[in-house]
Image (cartoon, rainbow, N blue to C red):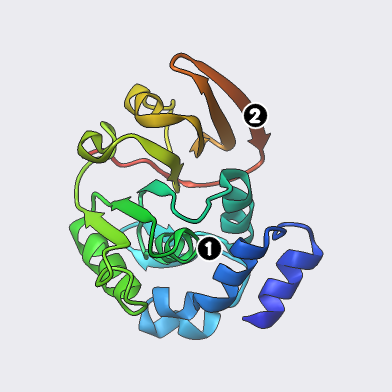
Amino acid sequence: MNQLIRELINSGYLKTPAIIEAFQKINRADFVPEEIKEEAYINAPLPIGYGQTISQPLTVAFMLELLQPEQGNKILDVGSGSGWQTALLCWVVGEEGKVFSLEIIPELEVFGRKNVSKYSFVQKKIASFYCLTAANGLPAEAPFDRIVSAASAQEIPQAWKEQLKIGGRMVMPVKDTLHLLIKKSENEFEEKVYPGFAFVPFVDK
């Protein structure tokens, strides 16, 4: 694991101390199926069943650096899958923060919640898991400081834009391109685009 983290730091993908610490403290091997644990420290996506993957470490590092989560943040994590990114976010936001994880595949929602529970984030109520479509966001808990999605959609859902706080940041894949949105006012967003990524498709039913 340490070698993987060193590679991500040396190649410039991991930069922020809090995010580096999360990568060091949250063991990716705790979030992959038992039969592929020995592959957990490879810089590649790995299958977790149901046509889904645990994302490539390089991609997760890049997305979290764009997202810039902070202590005390309230974050919507879409397509939580294995729970690895959820746990990384929980480490960064700390006991004053909240991470709301949405996963539409029931078996993966259970898998992810069980994995994140290994770090007591569920027990401490830092992480909350929901098995439902993310197309409408999570209006009951909005607004959010940060929104991040691990699945690729055809477009950014309007509900997510509305549920992001002014000054908040959203990172999500649209097709094979990563988008960073920074909310400047109720209807104004600064948008940056980063091409050249591959993600599993967004599932909404």
The reply to whether callout 1 and callout 2 are in contact (CB within 8 Å) is no
- For label 1, the residue is 45
| Residue in the foreground of this view, choosing between 17 and 113 | 17
- Which is closer to the viewer, label 1 or label 2? 2
From this view, report whether residue 188 is shown above or below residue 86. Answer: above
Closer-to-camera residue (9/103): 9
Q: Give the quarter of the figure containing the N terminus.
A: bottom right
Q: Is residue 118 left or right of residue 181?
A: left
Left-right relation of 137 to 132: right
Specify the quadrant that holds the C terminus.
top left
Residue under circle 2? 192
The picture places residue 102, in percent across and down from the top left corner, at 28, 49
Secondary-structure class at tag 2: strand
Mark number, residue 6:
none
Q: Residue at x 54, y 79 (%)?
A: 39
Decide which of 19, 46 is in the foreground and name it. 19
Q: Quadrant of residue 18?
A: bottom right
What residue type is disc 2 on? Lys
In the image: residue 179, left or right of residue 161? right
Position above or below: 32 against 164: below
Amino acid, disc 1: Pro
Q: Which quadrant of the structure image shows residue 112?
A: bottom left
Q: Residues within 10 Å of mark 2 (few under 14, many from 20)?
A: few
Residue 191 visible at all: yes
In the picture shown, does residue 127 fall above or below 189? below
Question: Which residue is found at the position 40% from the left and 60% from the top?
Answer: 86
